[in-house]
Image (cartoon, coloured by chain):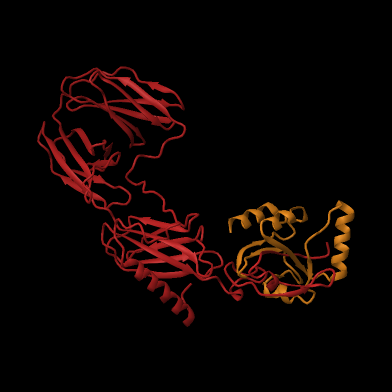
């Protein structure tokens, strides 16, 4: 995802990630990626430890309600959800190309 | 889904009101109601057949018969695919035939029909042996006619016309550019039915009494355009077209037609039952299913509709399936890895947001 962060920004969008990780876990995730692949996660990793936002987006994983089910939204400038993608559980994650294509289509 | 609560009823009434208003201007030739930026697929029902991408040709010669035209017909499983008339020298060629095995019928009034099997291959011209037609020794009669569109009077080209005898045997021919068709050499002692069933038109069946030997029955067949319905399906909030919404139309008798919306959110039914109350249901993932009725439509008219679907509420979606597209995204204000607060509202009016929910613990 981080590889295409610049492309997403160039398409006039911001990328935000939300999980139940706290700030320390997010920091260690950023360090891990930097170590392993020498890549900077440039986009914000937001912490929703209490799952309030995750719940508001109906994104609690029914199989493990303590974490989020991977899913991606595109929200337009008016705050309207314009696109949604439910990732296959434990399967392949959504490709950034697809997000870019959807962004350009809006 | 049956419309359950009061709010939905009101929303449905709004849709019906929109339908009614759009119908005030409805008529066969009005193209203006569906949104101008929504291209509606061109009408292909009476035009040329779709070009065959991989195609071959057929040519041959038949001994010429003075004063009698010779028809060459290509059939597959009894269905007429293409036809031509031999020229003054008895030569014929038919192009743009999809590869396959066909029966070729060479027929002329008063002569025995010759049938040959031919294999058509891509980019090749199949040649048939020279044919010689023998004079028929038994008495026969003929039927010929002209097929047209009743409203415009224009001839209908390349339309299948069927001739059925009381035993259920049938023959099929195609109309020519002038709308002409001919069944030569039919038995004299039989009744027949001529059937024309063209998509988008009312089916015609014409009974023909036994014809005296040597005579030709002339027919004028005019087809009446069946009513049509064309519509645009939109998200009620974003007003964007909904692609692949399932549109189902049921007439009073219970016949069901079904079509998905196109990439422009458009659906079209050609040839719906005339003068019947029609029920339409439109169903798209994560939207409330809409069901409404359309008043009976007379033949020759097309009704245009615009239908807006309402995104499902969060509690109508399965747990963990997220929120429906078209809904307002809930705001949030969450700390990033440095503890700085980031809110969705920070981007309002400025930027789109790609919001990724993740399992965490990378």
Which residue is depicted at the point 41% across and 22% down?
A: B125
Name the colour assigned to chain B in the rendering.
Answer: red
Q: Is residue B297 left or right of residue A33?
A: left
Q: Nearest the camera: B123 or B72?
A: B123
Q: In the current view of this chain or complex, which residue is farthest to the bottom?
A: B6
Residue B124: x %, y % from top left: 44, 23
The quarter of the picture where residue B348 lies is bottom right
Q: In the current view of this chain or complex, which residue is farthest to the front?
A: B350
Q: Is residue A29 left or right of residue B47?
A: right
Residue B118: x %, y % from top left: 38, 25
The quarter of the picture where residue B148 lies is top left
Q: Nearest the camera: B292 or B134?
A: B292
Q: Is residue B186 left or right of residue B159?
A: left
Residue B237: x %, y % from top left: 53, 70
Residue B260: in sight, yes or no? yes
Q: Nearest the camera: B172 or B88?
A: B88
Residue A19: x %, y % from top left: 77, 68
Residue B191: in sight, yes or no? no
Q: Quadrant of the C terminus of chain B?
A: bottom right
Which residue is depicted at the point 32% across and 64% down?
A: B253
Q: Is residue A67 left or right of residue B207?
A: right
Reply above or below: B289 against B124.
Answer: below
Which chain, by letter, is orange? Answer: A
Reply above or below: B222 against B259.
Answer: above
Which residue is depicted at the point 75% across and 59% down?
A: A90
Numbered circles on residues, count: 0
The quarter of the picture where residue A89 lies is bottom right
């Amino acid at each position: 995802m981080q590889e295409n962060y610049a492309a997403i920004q160039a398409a006039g969008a911001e990328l935000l990630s939300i999980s139940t990780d706290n700030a320390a876990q997010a920091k260690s995730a950023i360090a891990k990626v930097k170590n392993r692949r020498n890549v900077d996660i440039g986009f914000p990793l937001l912490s929703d430890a209490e799952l309030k936002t995750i719940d508001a987006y109906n994104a609690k994983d029914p199989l493990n309600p303590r974490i989020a089910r991977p899913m991606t939204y595109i929200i337009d400038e008016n705050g309207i959800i314009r696109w949604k993608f439910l990732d296959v559980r434990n399967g392949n994650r959504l490709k950034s190309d697809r997000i870019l294509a959807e962004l350009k289509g809006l | 889904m049956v419309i359950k609560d009061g709010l939905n009823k009101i929303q449905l009434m709004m849709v019906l009101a929109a339908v009614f208003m759009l119908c005030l201007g409805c008529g066969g030739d009005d193209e203006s109601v569906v949104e101008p930026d929504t291209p509606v697929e061109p009408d292909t029902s009476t035009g040329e057949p779709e070009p065959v991408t991989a195609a071959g040709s057929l040519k041959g010669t038949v001994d010429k018969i003075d004063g009698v035209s010779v028809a060459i017909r290509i059939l597959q499983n009894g269905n007429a695919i293409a036809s031509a008339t031999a020229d003054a020298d008895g030569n014929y060629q038919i192009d743009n035939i999809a590869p396959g095995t066909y029966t070729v019928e060479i027929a002329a009034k008063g002569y025995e029909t010759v049938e040959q099997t031919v294999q058509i291959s891509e980019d090749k011209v199949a040649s048939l042996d020279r044919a010689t037609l023998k004079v028929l020794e038994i008495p026969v009669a003929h039927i010929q006619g002209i097929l047209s569109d009743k409203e415009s009077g224009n001839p209908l080209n390349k339309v299948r016309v069927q001739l059925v005898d009381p035993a259920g045997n049938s023959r099929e021919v195609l109309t020519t550019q002038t709308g002409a068709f001919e069944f030569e050499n039919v038995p004299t002692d039989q009744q027949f039915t001529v059937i024309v069933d063209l998509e988008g038109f009312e089916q015609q069946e014409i009974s023909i009494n036994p014809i005296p030997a040597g005579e030709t029955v002339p027919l004028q067949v005019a087809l009446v355009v069946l009513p049509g319905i064309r519509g645009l399906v939109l998200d009620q909030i974003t007003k964007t077209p909904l692609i692949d919404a399932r549109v189902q139309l049921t007439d009073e008798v219970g016949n069901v037609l079904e079509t998905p919306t196109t990439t422009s959110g458009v659906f079209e039914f050609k040839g719906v039952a005339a003068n019947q109350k029609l029920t339409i249901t439109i169903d798209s993932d994560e939207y409330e299913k809409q069901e409404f009725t359309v008043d009976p439509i007379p033949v020759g008219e097309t009704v245009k509709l615009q239908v807006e679907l309402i995104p499902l509420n969060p509690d109508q979606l399965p747990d963990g399936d997220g929120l429906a597209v078209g809904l307002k995204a809930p705001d949030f204000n969450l700390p990033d890895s440095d503890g700085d607060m980031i809110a969705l509202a920070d981007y309002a009016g400025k930027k789109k947001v790609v919001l990724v929910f993740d399992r965490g613990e990378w």
